[in-house]
Amino acid sequence: MRAVPTWHSYVFAALAVTACGGGPPQASQTANTPGASGSTLQINGAGATFPNPIYSKWFAEYNRLHPDVAINYQPIGSGGGVRQLMNRTVFFGSSDMPMTDAQLGAAPGPILHLPTILGAVVPIYHLQGVEDLRFTGSVLADIYLGAITKWNDPAIAKLNPGVALPATDIAIVHRSDGSGTTYIFLDYLAKVSPAFKTRVGVNSSVNWPVGVGGKGNEGVASLVAQTPGAIGYVELIYALQNTIDFGSVQNSAGEFVKASHDSVSKAAGANPVPDDFRVSITNPPVAGAYPIASFTWVLMYQHPDDGAQGRAIVDFMKWAITDGQKFATDLGYAPLPPGVVTRELALLDTVRDS
Amino acid sequence: MRNEFSFRLAVGACAVLLIAVVAAIGLELARESSLSIRTFGLRFWLTTTWDPVAGQFGALPFIWGTLYSSFLALLISTPIALGVAIFISELCPTRLRAPLVFLTELLAAIPSIVYGLWAIFVLVPIVRQLETITPDVLRSLPLFSGPPLGVGMLAAALVLAVMVIPFTSAVAREVLKTVPVVQREAAYALGATRFEVIRSALFFARTGIVGAIMLGFGRALGETMAVTMVVGNNPQVSLSLFAPQYTMAAVIANEFTEATEELYLHALVEIGLVLFVITLIVNAASRLLIWAMSRSAVPASPRTTTIAATV
Amino acid sequence: MSRDTRRRFISAAFVTACAAAVLLAMVPLAMILFFVVSQGVQALNVAFFTQMPRPVGEPGGGMLNALVGTIVLTGLAALIAIPIGVVSGIYMSEYRGTRLAAATRFAADTLNGVPSIVIGIFAYAVAVMPFRRFSAMAGGLALGVMMIPIIARTTEELLLLVPGALREGALALGATRGRAVLTVIVPAALPGIVTGVVLGLARIAGETAPLLFTAFNNRFLSTDLRQPIASMTVQIFTYAISPYEDWHRQAWAGALVLVTFVLVCSLIARVVTARVQRLRG
């Protein structure tokens, strides 16, 4: 959508001016101006649902420590976060899928990827009395391709000897919105299943061959929890907080690993993290590592329009990647590797007003 | 005289403003979907691929989902709504009339998000149970194929039907009121049974009744929240009642804030434009029918148009 | 069976079918009210009305920001819709036969039928995109546009119901048209107009779709019109599609508050209408 105001918006602006009695909203500027009360700085952000549990904890905690800063984060999906950031309708975005070079090139200014936490995508399912199901990447890929349709399929039974699998249909649940969680999941499936890579591909939003779409990690968790025979993929915390069964996945070393902050941290340590922090850590060649793990990033402009908000977010980020990490393990996430934290603190110092 | 003129001018300006708002809506929709219209043209309405990544957008699954769900809703709701309208206007004891009217109005006034909430937690499990106990012989039909998810076309159609009933019934009631009493009395005098009298009244009011049904259809087409929560969010064209599908309003609600490219957003707005045009046509046609009906009967009472205005 | 008996049988069956239809229509209403009340009452406590939402996954907290948000949004909508709606209604009733009145009526009916999500798109294009922010004002605009036709048509209908004698009396006493309308006729129709406003408020307080990308949402309590704002409906939607049991209960509580509000508005409207009709005789 173009930002050129039409005559309708001028009319609306005129009404708005008389209604608010304040100065006209600056259409040429792009940042959100501080709250009318003047004392509280309100900053708007939007994006991934993957880290939402810990972000909401962080923002509440930070607001407790700094009552004059209110960071309003809305979990609308990674795709939405990138979109709103590029439109500059929010001050910062968040995504579990790194922006592509093309997207970065199309942005109005340089955007920084700031890793905040490490998390895991787990396969959740709803089967009575069946716990600790084992999956391999190729089995998951076949399920989501529609090649495996029943729970008692030989491929699943082979991985789970002695488990009583029912003969019911597998009800597949995926994301209906643009999702970084989807990206992480598909990134992994594409690495282990060439058929999946060609048929579906890897992105935040794809043409799913089968299944029901849920909105956000919350929607997928909710659908799986309510639908017997369902399978889905969500960030670990959503399975833990709602006591939904989730399975272990076979990693590249052949072990069946359940997601935990330990196995996720091992995955992060496998490959070197580049300077711009855009990296994929799925299916790492490390023993004991969980294969479907990922960083998640806060996205902000390196030269933000609004100095006050920029400083506030930089201050928040510095707190989040140091003190804030102590909330991670309780919520099922893994803290950032120390090497990443040091480099990120340096990167945060490069944020300057435009 | 000058006072008269300036009053008319001032008041008339507001009326013009109202018209301008409606025009503005249409214009903005057209403007913000221009890229998609130029890129895809008519193919947009015939393609089933909705692939934001590849930049391929086809709206056929959404049109199908909207029309199919609204049509099913109409199928379920029309007999019930007409039955309610007939009962209240012809058959019901006078004391019951006001409470029944109040209850139907209440049904209309419940916010759609509350319908959605009820649909997710109460209706969907019931539908899932129904789908699970469907005998296999029916399962082989395309109408009932697919796993028993609960969410899907059937749940959407049911919740839409419940939401549409009060609208159709209120308008049908008003339409029946315009049938001249003389006509009914004459029929009774000739020895007709109640059914036959009502049948002749329905025949007399048939244009208006059709208008009432169409108004309900228009309502179902535009419903967003309740449908979004239970339709399953899968853009596919499927006859099956059990299959998760997608409607035009639902895809806009779900994907609008995350349309990452210009073309994606324009495609969504184009869907909104089509929804706007379709509901405009359906509503205009229904009001035309109702107006024509009331014109041919007794002079239209203001009440007729009031209900039409408040739905 | 003789022809007569068959006819009577058909008639009886038909009457039974109509009665059954009424019962069938009442079933979902009863179910919804039952669930909303039984589930909502459990979660309705002082905290619900006075506290903010807790971080994700932690039980407790409330919907204070959403309650305030809905009040702000409906207030804004009323501010936009009442002037335009009432004055347009005045035009449509005073200058009934003109083409402009007919066009306005058509426009109002059309606007009434526009799906709320489409109005949301319009508000996004006009009030969000150019200013590059989600705001309570954009949400208020969307809701206000939806409210205009309800008020306009109700005002028109009620002004028409004012007895001609009142208007003729005013004009006979030498009042100009404008004065007659503003000082005599509109006040006479005022209870009805207020009813229309109340019903309009009830309807838009329950709207969700147009707020999704205009007012957006806000975790904090905010009354700043230029910032995003929470609302009951969007909050209920967010909670309903989530997996958290505590959020589900809060969603039912929110639904109870909404339904109660709508019920109260409907009752007020009925009482006022009945009183007006009694006064009129």
Image (cartoon, rainbow, N blue to C red):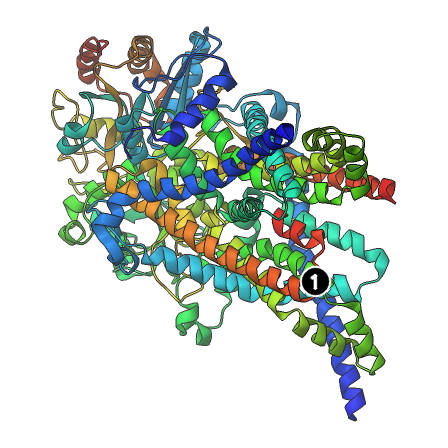
Closer to the camera in the image, A138 or B128 = B128
Q: How many marks?
A: 1
Residue tagged 1: B85
Residue B221, position as x, y percentages in the image: 48, 54
A302 horizontally vs C58: left or right: left
Specify whether residue B212 is in view: yes
Residue C102, position as x, y percentages in the image: 56, 48
Relative height, residue B18 to residue C23 (above, below): above
Circle 1 packing at 10 Å, graded few (<14), some (14-19), many (20+), is many
Relative height, residue A339 to residue C173 (above, below): above
| Quadrant assignment for the C terminus of chain A | top left
For disc 1, the chain is B
Mark 1, secondary structure of its residue: helix
B165 horizontally vs A267: left or right: right
Specify whether residue A165 is in view: no
- Residue at 50 percent across and 35 percent down: it is B17
| Quadrant assignment for the N terminus of chain A | top left
Relative height, residue C120 to residue B163 (above, below): above
- Residue at 45 percent across and 37 percent down: it is A242
Residue A271, position as x, y percentages in the image: 12, 28
